[in-house]
Image (cartoon, rainbow, N blue to C red):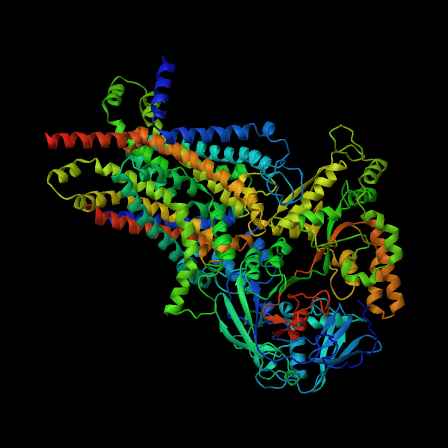
Amino acid sequence: MFSNKFFTYLRRFYKGNPAAIIGTFIVVTMLSLSIFAGAIAENDPNKRVARGHQPPSSELLLGSTRSGKDVFSQVLHGGKISLLVAFSAAAITTVIAVAVGISAGYFGGRVDEVLMSLTNIVLVFPQLPLLIIIAAFVGQVGPLVIALIIGLSSWAWGARVIRSQTMAIRNKEFVLAAEVMGESKFRIIFVEILPNLISIVVGGAMGTCIYALMAEAGLEFLGLGDPTIITWGTMLFWAQSNSAFIVGAWWDMVVPGAAIAIFGGGLALLNMSIDQVSNPKLRTGGYIKTWKRMKAETEARRAGA
Amino acid sequence: MRKLGISLAVAAAVSSASVASAAGKHAQGGTLTVPIITQTFIEDFNPYSGAQADMVSGTMFEPLWVINTMKGEIDWRLAESYTYAKDLKSMTIKLKKGLTWSDGQTLDADDLVFSLNLGKEDAKLDATGQWGGKKFASVEKLDALTVKINFTSKDSTIDWHLPRLHVVPEHVFASVEDISTFKNPNPVGSGPITEVKQVRDNQIEICRNPNYYKASEGFPYLDCIKFRQYTDNSQIQAALINDEIDWGSNFISDIDKTYVAASPDTHGYWYPANDLINVYLNTRELPFSDVRFRQAFSMALDREMIVDLAAYGYPTVETQVSGIGEFFKTHFNDEVNSKYAYLAEYNPERAMELLDEAGYKDVDGDGFVENPDGSEINFDIHVVNGWTDWVQTVQMVSEYLAEVGIKANTKTVDWSVYDSALKEGTYQASINWSRTNGEDPIQAYRDYFYTAQQGLSWHTNHGISSERIDAIIDEYSATSDKVRRKEILAELMTFTSENLAFVPLFSNPTWYQYNSTRIAGWPTEDNAFVQPVFYTGGNKLLVFEQLYAK
Amino acid sequence: MSFILRRFSFYLIAIFIAISFNFLIPRLMPGDPVDALFASAQGRMPLETLQAYKEMLGFVDGPLWVQYLQYIKSIFTWDLGPSIMLFPLPVSELLAVKLPWTLGLAGMSTVICVMIGLVIGTFAAYNRGGFTDRFMPAFWAFLGAMPQPVTALFLFFILALSWKWFPLSYGANPDLDPAFTLEYVGSVIHHAVLPITCMIIGGIGAWIFNMRNAMINVLGEDYITMARAKGLSNRRVMTHYAARNALLPVVTAVSMQIGFVMAGAIFIETVFNYPGVGLLLFKALAARDYPTMQACFLMIVVFVLVFNFIADLLNLWLDPRLRK
């Protein structure tokens, strides 16, 4: 029963929605590549296996870095950490945003005022400079600390959106009915309200994921990360320190950049398609053209008749 | 390089002929464009404030003389000669006749006395470091062109430090309240380039001195120097490739492929050896306390590979462990070197044997050896976060160590941590420079072992020193007997090689790129008339003097 | 006008929080920050200036709240301390020079992004299912997700270094005197093309997407149907009814974006040696020049807040519902 509904939902989601299909494909592929990096990439990403800056060839699919390490292997293993950071940050952010947003929206009154003031303040702070200052003072930040800092500073927008949605749902009949029936607040929140927020929450989580991925890469590119750990961001850092483009070793820089771009793009596509599901007005696809054509025909017939 | 001959009375040399170079005069005219790494330019032309010292030292304020280590001779600038007293407790400096400042006023002993005395009251103005080092006792003016400096004790090495003095005009600086923050906006100088033409955030142009004391010989050939602002090396690399600047002094990646290939006729570089880069080990702690461990450390490294991969092959590989590098190769002692050269060779098998002999064995089978007492070996090698070629070097060093069973980590740290760890001797291992590019090799050993330097210098805190070493270092400065000096150096070199308090890696290159699209007269490997160091005022002056527009 | 007052006081609180953040951070760090500062200045700071800096930071004798007041006072008298990298240049002077360049960059690129986003988004919304609608948002999603440093370096290498169409560095030609002459202004524009292009590439995807969605939502509203029923021309409906209402969420989005944009400038300024606040922050970072870093941060926050406030005012103007 549950599985039926689930699969029907999935089918509706994917049918005629190329963005969703492509997006999911990209995300799943890259995730698997990273998780199974050890099995797929034969070279140890930390070992020198060739001379520096060798172009892509049959032995080294994506060439070698300045220190002669395998770029293909690095981008796969590095993906593990980069994606982990992105997902952790998204998780932290989502948890906080949901907690704050639902509480503010549901309980209203003082709780709402306090939480909203807090949210607005955090919202208005430009995040990258904040990240930079914190990272600079802390000295040198490993990926986990980066995930933490990003997670703790990016929840505000999501909280606001969740709050307004919660407020909209709060006054619907089924919630009022549950309250009258005496259900505990806890249960109401988790069973009645939260399920209706799933699409926003997931959408928000994905947005944060993309943002966290890029912020992490940005911080490490600036040299604030730990350069001895391999992530997509540190790969960019080393490529830049070795003037990859100028010396003609474009793969050193383009590969991690493309990894971020492709994964980010895939997530963005998924995000867009989720939007389309929750708000069907936003859908797009070939069927619209068909519909227009049919409509035009109908009108022509009416005019002609 | 001929040995620098220092005798008790140095005769007056002919003023400018000591620099053998392109003969004859050149037509005047042209502008040299030079990069400076900074955030923005400011209107500050005070050599003592430090803000834009590179722009003014040498070319705006000439030194008394320049010690040209590459040719082994002295190039006399403002001074005509110096003489040590027989008892080595004072020195007399004679200025040249007819010197003037750029505003027409006479440059004489008053200015020199004034400049020398600046450091007496204020440590920040002690450019030579001799007041702070308690070497200078007093300064007296003997006549309009002669100054006598009295020392606190016998010393024959003061002449090495005097080129660092900035001789500034008394009539401008005497009325300034706080010289270290004085901006000197309308500078009056003694060098070839003194008139400030324009000051912008991203460019400063300074032009010819109307009252230059060498104008009669046609110097300087060039009219102006344009200083352009950049924030890092890759921008300078791009600017060099596109012919926007003429003289670079920075690290350029893959220079043959990027810079030289762009225009092989006019783009060139020359990287003569500079100071020695060492990994300093804390010999007071395990596992470094046993000299055999340190020797194994040294033999585990493939220096050629490290130079090739981590530093593009630009530095000079070091093949001996005597404590000085290529820069001072004329001081090399072949006997000592050949005895200990094996320590600098890549020999991992011998390294592993040594470890075993010394009791460092792999007891728990994890692939890494433990200390003789059984405790784990796992140390950090400090390097500053952001110095990428050194970070890569240290990473390679740890990889090589791992191959012989020594577990080491690359620890990138903040500058302040790095700095204090080196000075306080709290590091386990740390990569750093050495004082091996000065005027004389004794400075290197003084910096490595002299007990009074501990805590002040980065290189003295490895835990190895001795009274005898202190004594002979002192003796070196107090004697001018060449034979005795050579003996002392040999003893120091042997001491260094025997104890291996630090592991030499390679000699830093002098970063020097030149562009002859518009300017000629550059020093090159074939025309090696001076060490092309932009950041040392005297050397910069000597290079600049020979440049002319094509 | 209570709306304005409320928003204004809100922003004031935010600024105070930023200032407090700047106040707390050095005190939370391990070790004595002033010592670290002195070390990073490599002893070049004279004792009096060190004292002055300590005073500015509030490290005077007295309980914490006294120190805090001291710090607030120095901020409001615009005494931001000396910069370490360029000692003894005061930070406030340094900032005054750099700020206009970043503002120009951020401002121009946002304006262009909005305009292009508006046009393409509206077009996509109006031609549902067409090529633009299906292709554009996705294409820009990928291009926008490419890390900014990479796109900047790519453009730098191809257009500036190899083809030499555009200059390598600076906000304007260093041989020209800054003045409102045609030559100088032309040089400024020439130097700004690549940096602005990079910023646009990075941000436009979101704009197109947001504009399209906003338009679509609006087009579905009843008042649009009403306007059509009244017989108004398509163009009038599009501009007076649809666009104007679609602008509301856009204006909100702009204000959100500003912070992001000003921060994103840091990568682009680094690559192109563009003399803005972002590059200053980056270099201050490398040099551990804490006074400059803190001042940059404060400056960026203040401007983000200012733009947010302007956005609020614009919202007020556009949306009569808020004027009650």
Residue B162 position in % (x across, y down) = 71, 72
Q: Quadrant of residue B525?
A: bottom right
Measured as percent of width and height from the top left, residue C220 is found at 21, 35
Residue A225 position (above or below residue B218) = above
Tell me the quarter of the image containing the C terminus of chain A. Answer: top left
Q: Nearer the viewer, residue C62 or C211?
A: C211
In percent of width and height, residue C146 lies at: 46, 43
The total of numbered circles placed on residues is: 0
Q: Residue furthest front?
A: A304
Q: Is residue A205 visible?
A: yes
Question: In the figure, C21 relative to A2: above or below?
Answer: below
B535 left or right of C127 in image: right
Q: Is any part of residue B456 visible from this angle?
A: no
Residue B485, image quadrant: bottom right
Front position in the image: C286 or C83: C286
Which residue reaches farthest top?
A1
Q: Position of residue C144 (x, y in %)?
A: 42, 43
The N terminus of chain A appears in which quarter of the rendering? top left
